[in-house]
Image (cartoon, helix red, strand yellow):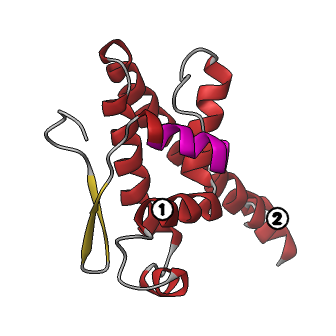
Amino acid sequence: MSTIQQWPTFKVGDQVFTIQMNFQAAYKLVDKFDFNIITLFLNEEETEKTMMRLLLDNEFSLKLMWHLIENKFNGDYDKLLEKLETAAELDPFRDALWSAVVLFSSPQLRELLRQSWERLKKDLKKVDLDSLISTKSLSEPSQEESTSAS
């Protein structure tokens, strides 16, 4: 399929899956999922939306995963759902898929794609942490409120 020696892999249960990307597979992602990796960075906003969708939309990620492994998976879609107990278990797939996107892309874009993916993941963790801190501080009474209520 390709001259790339090390396509990324991920596991579901005991099974290991390799994600290989070529134009035929990429166009299927566009047609079936409106997930366009062919024109990344022609429109920076669309590129960020593509990455955000993969990182945040669990249902979308599950459907993409199933599309890529259904012919090799030992079981049906329900069995896949049984094997994946939490949304966090989708992260190795997400990272493997993005690594395949990077390898599929032109060499000039690869480092930019890697850096953008890592930066977005870091930004999302920061937002999660910031929102957790904000929510916690809103739900806890301040020291003054605690003492005045006594």
Specify the label residue 145 is tagged with: 2
In the rendered image, residue 29 lying in the magenta stretch gets the answer: yes
Front residue of 30 and 58: 30
Look at the image and tell me whether residue 44 can be seen.
yes
Looking at the rendering, the stretch of residues picked out in magenta corresponds to 25-34
- Left or right: residue 95 compared with residue 6: right
Front residue of 47 and 129: 47
Residue 62 in percent (x, y) is at: 55, 65
- Left or right: residue 5 compared with residue 52: left
Residue 100 in percent (x, y) is at: 34, 41
Residue lying at 37% horizontally and 76% vertically, measured from the top left: 73
Specify the label residue 17 is tagged with: none
* Farthest residue, direction left: 5
Residue lying at 73% horizontally and 66% vertically, measured from the top left: 140
Q: Type of residue at label 1?
A: Met
Disc 2/disc 1 C-alpha distance (Å):
50 Å
Front residue of 27 and 129: 27
Name the image quarter holding the C terminus.
Answer: bottom right
Residue 90 in percent (x, y) is at: 45, 64
- Left or right: residue 130 compared with residue 1: right
Look at the image and tell me whether residue 141 can be seen.
no
Residue lying at 37% horizontally and 41% vertically, measured from the top left: 21
Q: Type of residue at label 2?
A: Glu
Count neighbours of disc 1 (C-alpha within 10 A) and say few if under 14, some if 14 to 19, many if 20 or more. some
At mark 2, the secondary structure is helix
Q: Could you say which quadrant of the image residue 74 lies in?
A: bottom left
Majority secondary structure of magenta residues? helix
* Foreground tag (2 vs 1): 1
Residue indicated by mark 1: 65
The answer to which of marks 2 and 1 sits earlier in the sequence is: 1
